[in-house]
Amino acid sequence: MNEISSQVISSAAMRNDTRKANKRLTSLTNLPVATSNPPLAWDSAHGFAYPATPSDHPVWQLQTPSLILSPKQAVTNFKAIQQAFPYANVGYAMKSNPHPAILSALSRIDNAWFEVASKAEMEALKGLGVDGRRVFFSNPIKQMSHIKMAIEYGVRLFVFDSEAEVHKLAACAHLAGDEQLEVYVRMTVPHTGALWPLTHKFGVEARKAVSLLQLAQAHNLKPIGFAFHVGSQCTRPDTWAEALQTVAPAWKMAREAGIEVDMIDLGGGFPTRYTGPVPDASEVAAAVNAVLDECVPGVKRVFLEPGRGVCGSAGDMVLEVTGVADRPDGQTWLYVDGGFFSGLYEIPDGIRPAAQPIVREPRPFGMHTYRLAGPTCDSLDTLFEMRSPVELKLGDRIVLKSCGAYVYSVSSPFNGFDQPVVVTDDEWMIDMQQFAGIC
Ligand SMILES: Cc1ncc(COP(=O)(O)O)c(C=O)c1O
């Protein structure tokens, strides 16, 4: 196949044919082909071929597995959420990607807040000069040493959802001097349309939420409102509205009980585009705006905690093909050097990145179905079925799109395999937009 001598078609007629072939590629893979994709190459003997990526392209120089981050994209995504919710304090859920390049880019945005769950996350923010007053501590169950550090750092906003947490917070409250710690209760809400529900581990119902706020008040903490999380990768804007409707009775009960709640935290859940369209932040805002005043009348502060919606599309992975095998199940398995334990652990739950094969020389175009799998010996380490428009071989590469969220922070060296090397698109002068993800 290496010997295929090919040339890029230049005549208008051929360009037209190329567009048609690209369309065919789209329908075969059922995914859009970006107009920025290189044109299909033409070979007189074999017809259209899958295009090569020249060997001097930086995508070949990267060590694999690599995660290429785009802090600029994270900033764009963050600002889009701020714009959609101009009345809200938007706090980046840094668990989704705490890489310093992403954090420092976001920390320079006007009125950027951060959501944290642990001491180490706060240390990272402190190191970047982020003011503790711009941080909310949204882990409902916190360790005492983390609460103490938070207060010393200047954090005054804490989520809770149990009596035990009230006692922990109250025991540390003196560290804030004359200031009161502001506390709000995590409620359990519907998660329809979320690929990664977060409702079972945390959250309480309305009546319990109000009695927790009363307990907090009795312990000299300042109860200010409620928080929820509709679940990660939530593709249904109405779910935020339904969550607000679930909070509404608690809001009313709290006010009737004399608790001056004035704050609602709408959590995260903003989706990233993987293999299909997703609503953008303004569609979520429209659903929220339609019910906000009715559900939480008199609300003065609105918080948001997006993670994936900020960094998901700000990172792509580059993997190399390290093995191919036909298995008794009739499937051809394609092994790559990054997988479940490299941080792609959400794939079995349906969060499946779009892929783009990268080859060094033009190859005949033709559909091949592969079962993609990671490098370790664990059978958990399988990824997804991939319909590739080209046959793949050892040494070829695959770009996985939108791996910016929950990959860097979760990857492990299990079985002795390298974790992804993290680079930024700027430092590598690589434009990952040209690999749109076609299968
Ligand atoms: C409390 C809290 N806030 C925000 C987030 C961010 O969620 P997402 O990445 O879906 O926006 C999470 C994710 O686990 C969370 O637990």
Image (cartoon, grey):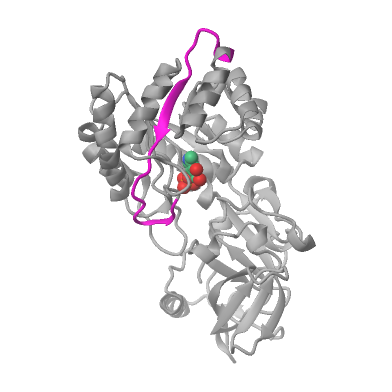
Residue 439 appears anywhere in the view = yes
- Residue 86 shows in this picture: no
Quadrant location, the N terminus: bottom right
Left or right of 146? Residue 133 is left
Q: Which residue lies furthest to the right in this view?
A: 416
Q: Quadrant of residue 393?
A: bottom right
Which of the two residues, 163 or 20, is positioned nearer the viewer here?
163
Position of 199 with respect to 249 (left or right) is right
Q: Is residue 166 positioned above or below 177 on the image?
A: below
Which residue is the extreme one toward the left? 294
x and y percentages locating residue 154 in the rendered image: 56, 19
Q: Which of the two residues, 382 or 388, is positioned nearer the viewer here? A: 382
Residue at coordinates 55% horizontally, 25% vertically from top-left?
Answer: 168
Decide whether residue 186 is among the magenta residues: yes
Expressed as whole percent of the image width and height from the top left, the position of residue 179 reads 49, 11
Q: Which of 179 and 405 is in front in this view?
A: 179
Viewer-side residue, 245 vs 64: 245
Question: What residue is at 53 percent from the left and 46 percent from the top?
Answer: 311
Q: Which image quarter: residue 99?
A: top right
The percent position of residue 383, horizontal first and vertical second, equals 59, 69
The number of discs equals 0
Q: Inspect the magenta stretch and tell me whether residue 78 lies in it.
A: no
Residue 239 x %, y %: 31, 49
In screen coordinates, is 128 left or right of 239? right
User: What residue is shown at x 33% (from left), y 29% (from top)?
Assistant: 210
In the displayed structure, would residue 216 be above or below residue 41?
Answer: above
- Up the image or down, 348 lies above or below 412; here it is below
Magenta part of the protein: which range? Answer: 175-197
